[in-house]
Image (spheres, rainbow, N blue to C red):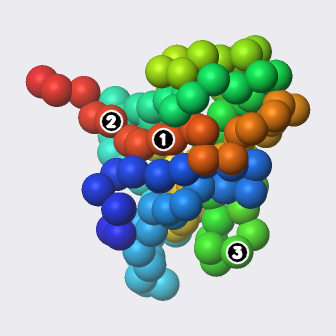
Amino acid sequence: MTDYMNRFGAVTNTGSANVLDFGEIDERAAMQTHRTGESGGQTVVFRAASAITGSVTVKLQDSADNSTFADLETAQAVVNPRAGDFAFLPFPLIHKRYVRAATAASATGVTARIEAGVSKPRG
């Protein structure tokens, strides 16, 4: 897996700076989808790097070809997030090869103001 240290980097309406690549699935494999794990537990943490005026919705998207992405998980909209505010999404157990973070924003100044990364609980 190519993971950029589990960081998506800056997140915008057009997607994150980094895309997680879970690698190819052998055509002979019984399952043709990627599984992050049976128990899950991974969470994507989104953080506002600075204040944003307006509504921001954070989401995860996946793709089979790293070109055409579709929404996978979406959080509720956050209105006027302040610098340092967080939003969380569970990392889905089943997804396509490529996964990225994105926003759906009707806000000003969102570019490079949202950062995201994958966090696994300690235990």
Q: Which mark is residue 27?
A: none
Earlier sequence position, callout 3 versus callout 2: 3
Task: Tell us which disc is closer to us: 3 or 1.
Answer: 1
Taking the image as drawn, is residue 63 in sight? yes
What is the quadrant of residue 67 in the picture? bottom right
Query: Dot 1 corresponds to which residue?
Result: 116
Label 3 vs label 2: CA separation? 25 Å
Instruction: Name the secondary structure under disc 2.
Output: strand
Q: At label 3, which amino acid type do we have?
A: Ser
Label 2 vs label 1: CA separation? 10 Å
Q: At label 2, which amino acid type do we have?
A: Ser
Counting every numbered tag in the picture gives 3
Q: Residues within 10 Å of mark 1 (few under 14, many from 20)?
A: many
Earlier sequence position, callout 3 versus callout 1: 3
Question: Does 7 sit above or below residue 55?
Answer: below
Residue 103, x across and y down, in percent: 71, 41
Task: Tell us which disc is closer to us: 2 or 1.
Answer: 1
Question: Does 1 sit above or below residue 12?
Answer: below
Query: Dot 2 corresponds to which residue?
Result: 119
Q: Residue at x 71, y 39 (%)?
A: 110
Q: Residue at x 55, y 60 (%)?
A: 17
Asked if labels 1 and 2 touch by Cβ distance under 8 angstroms, the answer is no
Q: Which mark is residue 67?
A: 3
Describe residue 69's horizontal placement relative to residue 96 as left or right.
Answer: right
Q: At label 1, which amino acid type do we have?
A: Ala
Q: Residues within 10 Å of mark 3 (few under 14, many from 20)?
A: few
Instruction: Name the secondary structure under disc 3.
Output: loop
